[in-house]
Amino acid sequence: GSHVSRGSRNFIPLDYTMMTEYATSVVQHVRPTESELVMKDTILRRISDICNNLVPGSRVVPFGSLVSGFATKGADMDVIFSHDTIEPQPSSMDSNIPIRLANEFLKRGFEVDLLIRTRVPILKVKTPSPGLEPGSRPSSPSAEHVLKETIEEDPWPENISCDIGFKNHLGITNSHFLRTYSQCDPRFGEMVLFIKQWSKNRDLNSPYFGTLSSYGYVLMVAHFLINIVQPPVLPNLQLIPPEPDTPLSEVSQDGYNIWYFKDLSRIESGDLLPGGKNEMSLGQLIHEFFQYYTTNFNFVSEVVTIRTPGGVMYKQEKGWTSARERVGEMTTYQDRYLLALEDPFEISHNVGRTCGGAGVRRIRGEMQRAAQMIRKLSTPFLHENAGRHA
Ligand code: CTP
Ligand code: MG
């Protein structure tokens, strides 16, 4: 009867073959093609040229999934506007750069959007569409000339959008940090791509609308692989102390501790994981990830952290308890701690602050649903009978 099957459910060993096959095919499908990567490289150089035109000596430096290797097909590019002028720019001019740059891109037929309600301003530019109507653009002679140049080059096969930031320099550091982790074990990148795809399919990846950024999901996966699963899949690279002769620039930036162990040869040899190698399949790891966040992790009191030994931290000890207002560059914004996700370097920054109550509830509900579906798919008995009830 139902009692027996319910009671014995926990003792049936799950078979993750199908889940692993499914996840592997999803990952293969969402990985960008070689030609997309080449095209993005071309676009980046063009964007850099446009910046350099406006502010001599400036360029854009990529970060985010372009650097970490976690990009999915058609993903936006994240870059930082950077200029290494000897003389610091007068600050009044600095604050005009986003607006002046926006105009430069407009003149060249890009779609442009300037976000100022964010922590730091973000300029979103989208490459010109192949079918662009020149008549619909600004008609000053210089603008037309530049636009003509743009159109007569090879048209882009599709619109690629690029987010240009103006201040987030730790973003470059944390992207290289994640890249190092992704080189420790291929299952990290595979899990990230799968979770990113899942979060997008289930509409849980909209930081501007109350849910979590991809970066937040990456940190959740890293926390699980470093601190939770036993034996760990990844070592904790922030806990291995630096050699005494390590340059200060590798240890500290903007007052934050940015040290992490970078010697890939020692990482690959496995001696940083004394508990032995974790042999779990991709399917099992994904299932345990969802299980952990739905049944073990306490969203109300705990903080997701990757640097902390043991990986457990409480909102209380970080003072992350009640919402507060903070004054940003151009606007004030709300700090919320409904989902507490500590940034690995900027430890005062809650990466989960974009999540509202409804967002957190939906994320948790969808995680529960995913865990249940994987359990069904991986239970031999249920699976064999599935056909009869269908
Ligand atoms: N970042 C950050 N703090 C945040 C959000 C993002 O420092 N609160 C930085 C990180 O360096 C991250 C980068 O911004 O790698 C890009 O974040 P995001 O777009 O969320 O991640 P991607 O991996 O680029 O994902 P997607 O492909 O969905 O754009
Ligand atoms: Mg991105």
Image (tube, rainbow, N blue to C red):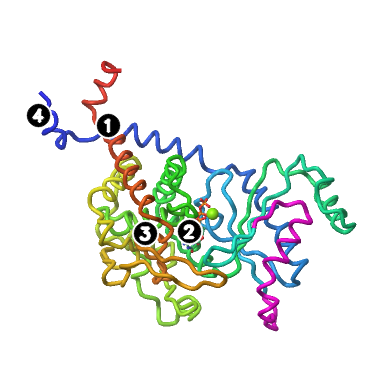
SS under mark 4: helix
Label 3 to label 2, Cα distance in Å?
18 Å
Say which of marks 4 and 2 sits in front.
4
Query: Which circle marks residue 8 in the picture?
Result: none
Q: Earlier in the sequence, mark 4 or mark 2?
A: 4
Precedes in sequence: disc 4 or disc 1: 4
> What residue is rendered at 70% in x and 76% in y?
93
* Residues at marks 4 and 3 touching, judged by CB atoms closer than 8 Å: no
In the image, 117 versus 281, the foreground residue is: 117
Cα distance in 3D space between marks 4 and 3: 48 Å
According to the picture, the residue beneath numbered tag 2 turns out to be 179
Q: Which mark is residue 376?
A: 1
Q: Which mark is residue 269?
A: 3
Residue 78 rendering spot, x and y as whole percentages: 58, 58
Dot 4 alpha-carbon crowd within 10 angstroms: few under 14, some 14 to 19, many 20 or more: few
Q: Is residue 318 a member of the stretch shown in magenta?
A: no
Residue 53 relative to residue 327: left or right: right
Q: Amino acid at mark 2?
A: Arg
- Circle 1 sits in a helix, a strand or a loop, which is it? helix
In the displayed structure, 97 sits above or below 289; it is below
Residue at image coords 29%, 52%: 277
In the picture provided, is 376 more to the left or to the right than 356?
left
Pointer 3 local density, CA inside 10 Å: few below 14, some 14–19, many at least 20: few
Amino acid of disc 4: His
Which stretch appears magenta?
A: 84-113
Residue 332 in the image, given as x and y percentages of width and height? 50, 69
Quadrant in the rendering for residue 215: bottom left
Residue nearest the observer in this picture, 302 or 51: 302
Q: Quadrant of residue 99?
A: bottom right
Under mark 1, the amino acid is Lys
**Quadrant location of the N terminus?**
top left
Question: Residue 3, labelled with which disc?
Answer: 4
